[in-house]
Image: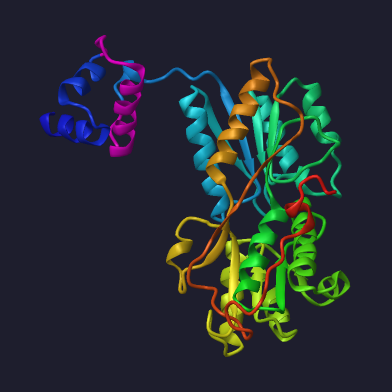
């Protein structure tokens, strides 16, 4: 027990006496310190004493389209931790090919009496889907919040990254490195995040490099699946069209783009630069380490939990979209293009020079 106390104390940054007081349920310990000790127990793999186990305030459903893409487990972890800290028990429900649909998962969660549901990249992001399903959920008095994909047909809080701004970051970075023919590999066009990325990419290519929208839309955009194989197929077509740099809509697609470059006998980043999207766990350790647009997963996940709990508490958050700024993370998959670094002057768009638009 002495060794365990010292381990827990070291992990929590408190004294062994404080750990003992928490484990024995004695007073005189602040709520913050108590939580630090309980977190240390969890991190070290120790089981909490029965008396310290938190009674669940209720179940919260979390629906994701898959877990193969590492961005979805990342969201699940952040959301699960945030819910647990608030006393709720997260219930992860994942769609699988040939398995349960989103509607079936919702029905299952509602039958189990969940207090609310968080959707990550669900049917709400599909511009062709019937949004009445969410109105029916309102009719069942089940609050919900939605991540990635906005629809003005749904009355609920939405949490999104700035997809248009993300493309601006990627194009500006590559243009500054001397790339002039930049391609975009994205998912199916019916999804809201895809449409927004296209809008941001087309506008940025025009404003930064002077490439007409018609040329960008015709020659420099490829739609595929959000998988390594999808990225490989899309990037192969873009390389065939003479692109020296490829921006992708996910890190998995970016890894496929790197594979496509190598199959064409090209080296990344010497011959081709590749930019991902998400900054998924472990992506910094690929070969080469991936330059990517970091989706603010922690901030977005926590915001979704706050919005949902406000809905549950009867003081709903505004039924509008909360947009979070992404971040360019430069690593080893981008380098100077044929034009050479610094050869391209990157203009400031009109709306950034004068926010009023005048």
Q: Give whichever of 282, 91 is nearer the camera.
A: 282
Q: Is residue 123 left or right of residue 303?
A: right
The x, y position of residue 282, in whole percent, is 45, 59
Q: Which colour style is shown?
A: rainbow
Q: Residue at x 64, y 28 (%)?
A: 307
The x, y position of residue 348, in whole percent, is 72, 61
The x, y position of residue 41, in whole percent, is 29, 31
**Residue lying furthest left in this view?**
2
Q: Residue at x 21, y 16 (%)?
A: 21
Characterize the magenta stretch by its predominant secondary structure: helix
> Is residue 16 something one can see in this rendering?
yes
The x, y position of residue 115, in whole percent, is 63, 22
Which residues are drawn in magenta? 25-47
Q: Is residue 106 left or right of residue 278?
A: right
Residue 109, picture quadrant: top right
> Is residue 228 something one can see in this rendering?
no
Q: Residue at x 80, y 45 (%)?
A: 356
Residue 181, picture quadrant: bottom right
**Residue lying furthest top in this view?**
27
């Amino acid at each position: 027990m002495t060794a365990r106390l010292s381990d827990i104390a070291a992990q929590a940054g408190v004294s062994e006496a404080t750990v003992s007081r928490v484990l024995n349920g004695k007073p005189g310990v602040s709520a913050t310190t108590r939580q630090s000790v309980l977190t240390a127990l969890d991190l070290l793999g120790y089981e909490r004493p029965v008396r310290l186990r938190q009674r669940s305030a209720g179940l919260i459903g979390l629906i994701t389209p898959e877990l193969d893409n590492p961005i979805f487990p990342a969201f699940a972890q952040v959301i699960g931790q945030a819910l647990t800290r608030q006393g709720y028990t997260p219930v992860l429900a994942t769609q699988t090919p040939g398995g349960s649909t989103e509607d079936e998962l919702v029905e299952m969660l509602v039958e189990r009496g969940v207090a609310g549901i968080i959707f990550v990249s669900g049917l709400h992001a599909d511009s062709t889907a019937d949004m009445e399903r969410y109105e029916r959920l309102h009719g069942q008095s089940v609050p919900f919040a939605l991540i990635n994909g906005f629809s003005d047909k749904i009355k609920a809080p939405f949490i999104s990254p700035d997809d248009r701004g993300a493309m601006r970051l990627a194009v500006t970075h590559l243009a500054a490195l001397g790339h002039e023919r930049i391609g975009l590999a994205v998912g199916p066009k019916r999804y809201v995040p895809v449409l927004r990325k296209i809008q941001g990419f087309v506008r940025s290519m025009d404003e930064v490099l002077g490439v007409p929208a018609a040329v960008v839309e015709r020659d420099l955009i490829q739609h595929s699946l959000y998988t390594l194989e999808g990225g490989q197929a899309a990037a192969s077509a873009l390389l065939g069209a003479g692109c020296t740099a490829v921006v992708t809509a996910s890190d998995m697609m970016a890894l496929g783009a790197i594979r496509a470059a190598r199959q064409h006998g090209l080296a990344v980043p010497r011959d081709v630069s590749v930019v991902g999207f998400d900054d998924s766990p472990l992506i910094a350790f690929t070969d080469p380490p991936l330059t990517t647009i970091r989706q603010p997963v922690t901030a977005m996940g926590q915001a979704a939990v706050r919005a949902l709990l406000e809905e549950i508490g009867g003081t709903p958050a505004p039924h509008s979209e909360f947009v979070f700024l992404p971040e360019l993370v430069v690593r080893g998959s981008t380098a100077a293009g044929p034009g050479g670094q610094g050869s391209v002057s990157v203009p400031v768009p009109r709306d950034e020079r004068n926010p009023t638009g005048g």
